[in-house]
């Protein structure tokens, strides 16, 4: 088989950028992604405080809140395949409707059961079931939105790798930025409005619905639309795992989402752990921060991740996708090594002085540089997923359904397993867990590179494949 031409060179010969109306619709769905992530995370924060004041069991609270990922996992598998037949717009509009219903459920429950002292035994059951159903609805909303959004992105950028790079990077930035902004905003809304904060969440979902209804008019339905049973659509999404381009890359996508999930869920908790000093008293980064300070530090790291993705836009289109991903893994290694050294400098921040204080500042700067380098991985990975989606003709929605599957499994399993590492090794456990998944990710990416799957360009209208 002749060698594959680099995708950027092949794409330049037949570049077909999206039309103005397609770019406008792309902007609308990406903005909707930001608002949906923002609202769901604000809802998560308010709900966490509400349940924390009424339920003593941390495990029960975690089970209810994490139910979000269970429904997201199932619905994303189904909606990906179904969107290939019924069109992307239906699922884009369905998402804020379901999420808005969840917000109404939370608002209603919070006002019917405002005080734990007034709740009967039957009331506790109603509270748990109602909140659980609301979280399942929110997860289903995300499962409906993400595959449809990424499938539409794949559809309209099929003839332009340059626009695809911009679009997938913007999508990932919107996703992360929504979570980052919601961290301080959710706490402020909860403190100021208490249960009335759910009305803000419902309002955001309503804005998303209106903007999508107006901004996605004219979105083309798939040519091959035909009715398929729900289970058949789930099997469609799972069936694409037989394709080499998907199967070889999925371990890398699972691994990086495991790392991101661990830091998003456990980062603040690890830095501000209440009982950390009893478990591992000689670690600078374990339990020595206030919740406000820990939230600020994790937020700064997340912001650097977002800014880094914006900077990578101009490089991803000029380099092999696996090159960008491998460089990103180097960034992860740099950040983890710097944090491991920083964690051993002193027992507490107040013990830093003189040379150790300067060393701490340098290590923090190196960590942020590592995060900037790492940030190129996710847009390059999404570009690779889009290319794999096009390689599976007519099944791009099914492939993109796996995005949410890997996102849900990676973040849910990542945070759970990383928690065991943190209990055993403290902050070093979080670093060690990230390093192990980083190695697994590198192995998967190298497999993709060795087989040349990252050199397969988009094959949309006007773009000819460079290999048989």
Image: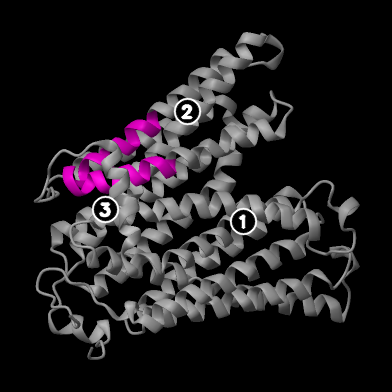
Which callout, 3 or 1, points to the residue nearer the camera? 3
Q: In this view, does 445 lie above or below 257?
A: below
For the C terminus, which image quadrant? bottom left
Magenta residues (range)? 72-100
Write down the residue under mark 1: 262
Q: Quadrant of residue 392?
A: bottom left
Please tell me whether mark 3 sits on a helix, a strand or a loop: helix
Question: Could you tell me residue 173's position as x and y percent?
Answer: 42, 61
Q: Are marks 3 and 1 in contact (CB under 8 Å)?
A: no
Image height check: is 55 above or below 438?
above
**Residue 162 belongs to the span the image colors magenta:** no
Q: Which of 52 and 433 is in front in this view?
A: 433
Evaluate if marks 3 and 2 touch, with contact meaning CB atoms under 8 Å apart. no
Q: Can you see residue 468?
A: yes
**Residue 214 image position (x, y, % from top left):** 19, 41
Which residue is located at x 41 percent, y 60 percent?
172
- Please name the predominant secondary structure of the magenta segment in the image: helix
Magenta highlight on residue 74: yes
- Is disc 2 surrounded by few (<14), some (14 to 19) or many (20+) residues within 10 Å? many
Tell me which residue sits at (74%, 75%) in the image.
Answer: 361
Pinpoint residue 45: horizontal percent, then vertical percent: 58, 38
Task: Name the residue that disc number 2 marks.
Answer: 134
Residue at 19% x, 67% y is 158
Label 2: element kind? helix
């Amino acid at each position: 088989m002749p060698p594959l031409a680099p995708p950027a060179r092949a794409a330049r010969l037949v570049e077909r950028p999206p039309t103005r109306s397609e770019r406008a619709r792309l902007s609308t769905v990406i903005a909707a992604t930001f608002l949906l992530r923002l609202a769901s995370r604000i809802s998560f924060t308010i709900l966490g405080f509400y349940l924390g004041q009424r339920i003593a069991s941390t495990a029960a609270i975690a089970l209810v809140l994490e139910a979000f990922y269970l429904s997201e996992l199932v619905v994303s598998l189904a909606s990906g395949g179904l969107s290939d037949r019924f069109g992307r717009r239906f699922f884009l509009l369905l998402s804020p409707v379901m999420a808005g219903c969840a917000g109404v459920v939370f608002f209603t429950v919070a006002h019917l059961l405002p005080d734990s002292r007034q709740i009967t035994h039957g009331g506790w059951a109603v509270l748990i079931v109602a909140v659980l159903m609301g979280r399942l609805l929110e997860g289903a909303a995300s499962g409906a939105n993400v595959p449809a959004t990424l499938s539409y992105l794949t559809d309209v950028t099929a003839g332009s790798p340059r626009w695809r790079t911009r679009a997938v990077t913007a999508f990932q930035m919107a996703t992360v930025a929504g979570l980052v902004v919601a961290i301080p905003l959710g706490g402020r809304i909860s403190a100021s409005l208490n249960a009335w904060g759910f009305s803000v969440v419902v309002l955001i979902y309503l804005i998303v619905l209106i903007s999508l209804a107006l901004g996605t008019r004219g979105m083309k339905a798939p040519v091959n639309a035909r009715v398929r049973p729900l289970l058949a659509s789930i099997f469609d999404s799972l069936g694409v795992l037989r394709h080499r381009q998907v199967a070889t890359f999925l371990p890398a996508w699972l691994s990086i989402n495991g790392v991101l999930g661990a830091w998003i869920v456990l980062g603040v908790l690890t830095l501000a752990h209440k009982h950390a000093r009893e478990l591992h008293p000689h670690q600078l980064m374990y339990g020595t921060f206030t919740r406000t300070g820990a939230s600020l530090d994790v937020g700064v790291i997340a912001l650097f991740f977002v800014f880094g993705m914006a900077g990578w836009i101009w490089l991803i289109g000029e380099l092999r996708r696996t090159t960008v991903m491998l460089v990103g893994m180097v960034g992860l290694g740099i950040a983890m090594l710097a944090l491991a050294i920083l964690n051993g400098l002193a027992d507490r921040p107040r013990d830093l002085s003189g040379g150790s204080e300067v060393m701490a500042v340098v290590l923090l700067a190196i960590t942020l540089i590592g995060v900037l380098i790492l940030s190129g991985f996710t847009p390059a990975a999404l570009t690779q997923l889009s290319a794999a989606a096009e390689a599976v003709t007519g099944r791009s929605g099914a492939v993109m359904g796996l995005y949410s599957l890997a996102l849900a499994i990676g973040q849910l399993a990542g945070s759970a397993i990383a928690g065991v590492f943190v209990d055993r090794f403290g902050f070093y456990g979080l670093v060690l867990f990230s390093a192990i998944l980083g190695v697994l990710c590198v192995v998967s990416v190298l497999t993709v590179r060795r087989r040349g799957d990252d050199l397969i360009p988009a094959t949309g209208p006007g773009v000819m494949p460079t290999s048989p």
